[in-house]
Image (spheres, helix red, strand yellow):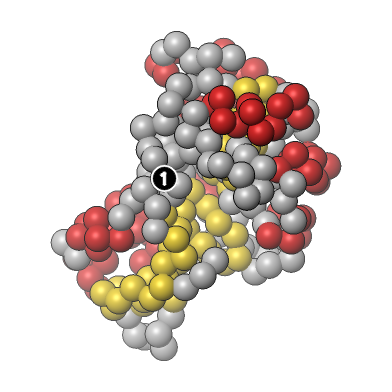
Amino acid sequence: MRIEDLAKCDTIIERAAEIVKSGGVIVYPTDTSYGLACDPRIPEALERLMAVKRRDRRTGVPLLFNDLKQCEMYHNFGSLERVIVRIFWPGLLTLIVDARPDVPEHITADRSTIAIRVPNHVIPRGIAQKIGGPIVGTSANRSGGQTPFDVTVALNQLGEEVDLYIDGGPSQSTDSSTVIGVEGTGKDEPLNIKVYREGQLSISKLSESLKVDSDALSTWSSRFVYTDM
């Protein structure tokens, strides 16, 4: 399905949500690369998605949400995290956070953390709203394959293993989302920001925005700690 007007894509969102709710797998546009989605709450759908992507199930998957309220079903936000999402969501920033205890193990892949984001794109947010929960936000490529910023790149890699391709044209981004987390430095001490991946949102831009926000300055140490994902 091709999007002709982002302001008039309710039918596409409805169709995609129907497929996802029934356990299907779709490719869809975002504000970064094209994504590969299913309803992560359906274990069989998640297993199928991982098979399509040829990805190790133990690595987990990022989740895209409609809004902050929906995210709060999966994570209890701390003070600095709330500042960060107020500034950068919806947008190009993924957060690594502690999963709530009631998040199913097949979603967390037996990890204590999950990756979450509210994207600045009507399609993934609309689908998440329709199904009443997150959709998987992994890139629509084979594991190790070319990142798809155009639907044809996804189609060439995934072929007929996907139930629906939504063509939103070339992405306005040329890189994936930036991935960060919040790291404690001790009791009652300011928090560090851990950088797992610098993507479309530069760390310099992130830093500039935080350093002029009084709430950020009251909870952040002004320090970035770089680490591997």
Question: Where is mark 1, residue-wise?
Answer: 175
User: Is 170 rendered above or below residue 145?
Assistant: above
Q: Which amino acid lies under the numbered mark 1 shown in the image of this protein?
A: Asp
User: Is 182 rendered above or below residue 119?
Assistant: below
User: Is 121 rendered above or below residue 87?
Assistant: above
Expressed as whole percent of the image width and height from the top left, the position of residue 121 reads: 43, 32
Say whether residue 160 is left or right of residue 12: right
| Res. 101 image quadrant | bottom right
Residue appearing at x 34%, y 85% in the figure: 189
Expressed as whole percent of the image width and height from the top left, the position of residue 48 reads: 79, 40
| Res. 16 image quadrant | top right
The C terminus lies in which quarter of the figure? bottom right
Residue appearing at x 39%, y 40% in the figure: 174
Residue appearing at x 53%, y 20% in the figure: 167
Expressed as whole percent of the image width and height from the top left, the position of residue 9 reads: 49, 15
Expressed as whole percent of the image width and height from the top left, the position of residue 145 reads: 61, 44
Q: Which type of secondary structure does the marked residue at label 1 adopt?
A: loop
Residue projecting furthest to the right: 44
Work out whether residue 133 or residue 135 is closer to the camera in this orientation and state it.
Answer: 135
Dot 1 alpha-carbon crowd within 10 angstroms: few under 14, some 14 to 19, many 20 or more? some
Work out whether residue 81 or residue 108 is closer to the camera in this orientation and state it.
Answer: 108
Residue projecting furthest to the bottom: 186
Residue appearing at x 45%, y 11% in the figure: 4
Q: Is residue 41 visible?
A: no
| Res. 128 image quadrant | top right
Say whether residue 212 is left or right of residue 130: left
The N terminus lies in which quarter of the figure? top right
